[in-house]
Image (cartoon, grey):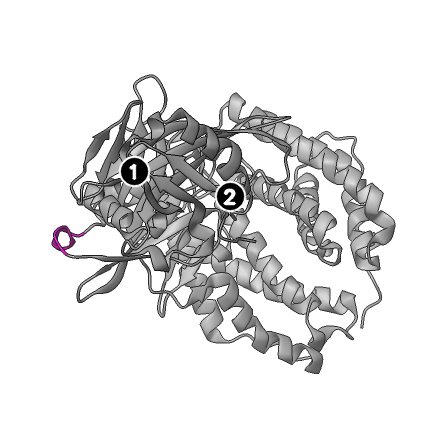
Amino acid sequence: MFAIPVTTLTSLNAWTNLPRDPDAIRFLEKTVLPPYLNACRWFAGKARQQEQFRIQHSHEVPFASGENAFLLIVEVTYAEGESEHYLLPLSFLANGQPGTSVVPEKGILARAVVDQKPGLLVDAIYDERFRLALYADLVTQNTLSQEAGQLTFHRGRGLATEDWDVDVTSRVLPVDSSNSALVYGIPGQGEKYFLKLYRKLFQETNPEVDLVSFLTEESHFTHIPAYAGSIVWEQTTMPDMTLGMMQLMIDNQQDSWSQTGDYLNDFLYAVPNRLFTIREEVFDRVELLGRRTAQMHLALYSPDTTDPAFVPEPFTDDYRDFIIRRFESLLERRYAMLIDKYTELDPLAQRLAWVFMEAKEMIDEFVDDFRHRPLDSLRVRIHGDYHLGQVLATPDDFIIIDFEGEPESSISERKIKHSPLKDVAGMIRSYHYAVSAKLFGSRETERIDPDHLQRVSDRWFKLIRDTYMDAYLETVGNPHPLFRNSNEFNFLLLIYLLEKAVYELGYEISYRPAWVKIPLKGIVDVIGEIEKIRIADPARNSDVPLLQMGLLQTKKE
């Protein structure tokens, strides 16, 4: 909860010299920043034992009026674990100054008396002078020298030349999230640009900026919000650090998760009447998304690029070891969680869990196959966190957003090249979640036998999955250097589907026990496909027994 602070910062220095007032800086670090950051949605350290808040750097952003704001780089250290760095734009609004009355409570850090002038210390995103300064710096591709390095403003192709010298309007998008969003309007065109300021910082360029700028500047893929610019802190002895990115705004109806849920309503209402209903429009949309996914991956496949971040790479031993280490760690933790919670699961989830645990040796053998199997397919940069919620639905198409990668992964890990099938697996799992959550979580179906719902859910899912995959493969072409042949394609898809479903299982066990059956069904489906591969290979020498899949069978209706 936010409330206007009663604490008052006092400095005899002029505002531009505030960073050189040690008493004022100490007051900020000890008294102002701890309560303020802990009340912010974007601060990720609330649950950790905090030891110190330190203003590591103060970058000056001058205004056209001659005043300025600061971009504070705040280091937060903890009793355990690594420290974190956060971006906090800071501005001073003197009492009576235009704009003071429109700053929300959550944007006020403290009362202040600076150079004998009373006013407010505010998050500078709520100061229009700061918002307009950022836009002007991006338009002019400005470079601002700082005591530590420089702030460089890069302009992208998405920032139209006719918008360089206009009187823009600006506002803060009133959405609490892990970053902050500023919106800019162009006369006669409405709100056109969206500037995301990254709050939690990493000592590297943000993978989202890498990917969006590459797709905008180096390819013809237009189904993303075009890259309009970025703000980067550059130092000679340290990697560049991304502070923000501007893109074109998109007029969307809803995300594809919501749209798919709406389409599923017709299907849901028919199930109690033992009718199977899917509108033709659903298949058209799924097919279109399959094509757009493939086009995105083809745009990211750039064998002629000189940028090492985007040069395609083979399946090296190091990459395989990375995937296997992460997957085996996941598996061990998920088995332990299932054993601990097994008796609390519903009967359907228990049967699925039993097959999963019985398949441990088979999964181990499959993972070992991934370690040693010759693979000619290639790896490229991918979206990395691809699901229906990351795709905006326009009236007749799709726009793909949020290229930051897996939230749980480090920035370095998010930049690792994978097979595009990792994205494909994410979308397939998302469709499976959409139908399963709708059927198992609605009042209309709560009296229907869960085994029957599972069969109905499987029928819808398989139709949608096959429609999506057929469109994807048709667009990519077969063979393609990304996927040398059908055997490798199918094998790699199973690897990523299994990894994704096992990852999902942990969240459901911890937070939504009623949904545990959803990732478990995804795991068991992959296990069934692995078993088919084993049976079809007469040369395979394995001591692992076949699974008793009959454990899943119930009486036929």
Mark 1: which amino acid? Ile
Give the percent coordinates (x, y) of residue 543.
79, 30
Disc 1 to disc 2, how far (Cα)? 24 Å
Closer to us: 387 or 204 = 204
- The correct choice, above or below, for 57 with respect to 162 in the image is above
Q: Secondary structure at mark 1?
A: strand
Q: Earlier in the sequence, mark 1 or mark 2?
A: 2
Give the percent coordinates (x, y) of residue 323.
58, 31
Instruction: Examine the image and state in which quarter residue 183 appears.
Output: bottom left
Question: Looking at the image, can residue 113 be seen?
Answer: yes
Closer to us: 332 or 78 = 78
Give the percent coordinates (x, y) of residue 512.
71, 55
Residue numbers of the magenta segment = 160-166
**Residue at point 28%, 34% (across, down):** 14
**Residue at point 32%, 48% (across, down):** 93
- The residue indicated by pointer 2 is 36
Question: Looking at the image, can residue 469 be seen?
Answer: no
Closer to us: 531 or 408 = 408
